[in-house]
Image: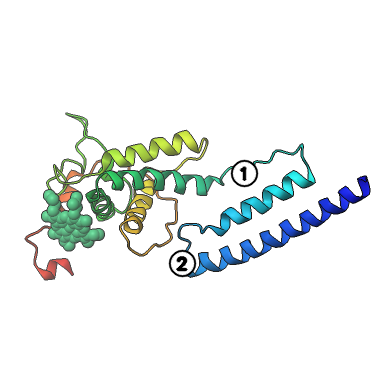
Amino acid sequence: MAFRLSHLSLALSLVALALAGVAIYRNTYEAMSKGFQTLSPELDLLESAASILTLNNNAEQNSDSKLTQPLSPLACIFSAVQGVVNSAIDRERRMGASLIRLHFHDCFVDGCDGGVLLDDIPGSFQGEKTSPPNNNSARGFEVIEQAKQRVKDTCPNTPVSCADILAIAARDSVVKLGGQGYNVALGRRDARAANFTGALTQLPAPFDNLNRAN
Ligand code: HEM
């Protein structure tokens, strides 16, 4: 009797394995052709097959087949920033444009050093944020702050500069709004000095002519 049961168990395992193989093949093919969009119903088939295997082969084993490995530090940073940016753009679509502009306004003044994010300290520190090209028109500061906080909370002991977070946020905005993705290398150092006049002289003004733009 026990011998027959083990044969039945083996046969069930083989059927489940074959179903899983077909599902994996079809899923991979579909994901490649659709650009990794929503997972197809075949995934349900794969999950059913996997759970048959799990139950059949080791009833005591935890049947939760989801991956539980922690993200690598870099992947954790990128995923944290993307989550915050996507939610912000879901709330207000314009925010994507604002974050792209914020990155541009950061990089044109002394390079991409997060200088545009620094708050003034009345009497001792006047930075780029309140310089005319940014004052009351640059937006998205709170999204960058949220992203920084999310990285701190979810990726402990993974230092990353605010300038890097802004660079990632701009790229994620482009992607979220339907544009082409690109790699963002990390390693920018945050500014420690204010440059109020730099924002005036290094960013092109709306009344500049083409010679100045060149
Ligand atoms: C070259 C000279 C440029 C000038 C003079 C200029 C000027 C301006 C001005 C006056 C605004 C309106 C700001 C407001 O709503 O108060 C604006 C918005 C914007 N600019 Fe530029 N810009 C320039 C280049 C760029 C570049 C290179 C980018 C992209 C990297 C860019 C991206 C944007 C975006 C996305 C907005 C809309 C921001 C929002 O809706 O919050 N601009 N720009």
Question: Where is mark 1, residue-wise?
Answer: 69
The three-letter amino acid code for the residue at tag 1 is Gln
Q: Is residue 173 visible?
A: yes
Q: Is disc 1 surrounded by few (<14), some (14 to 19) or many (20+) residues within 10 Å?
A: few
Q: Classify residue 204 as left or right of residue 151.
A: left
**Marks 2/1: CA–CA distance:** 27 Å
Q: Is disc 2 surrounded by few (<14), some (14 to 19) or many (20+) residues within 10 Å?
A: few
Closer to the camera in the image, 15 or 209: 15
Q: Classify residue 156 as left or right of residue 136.
A: right
In primary-sequence order, the first of circles 2 and 1 is 2
Question: Contact, CB < 8 Å: mark 2 with mark 1?
Answer: no
Closer to the camera in the image, 146 or 105: 146
Q: Residue at x 83, y 52 (%)?
A: 8
**Residue 210 in picture, x, y percent from top left:** 12, 70
In the rendered image, the residue lying farthest to the front is 1
Of the four image quadrants, the one with ligand 1 is: bottom left
Mark 2 or 1, closer to the camera: 2
Q: Residue at x 62, y 66 (%)?
A: 25
Circle 2: element type: helix
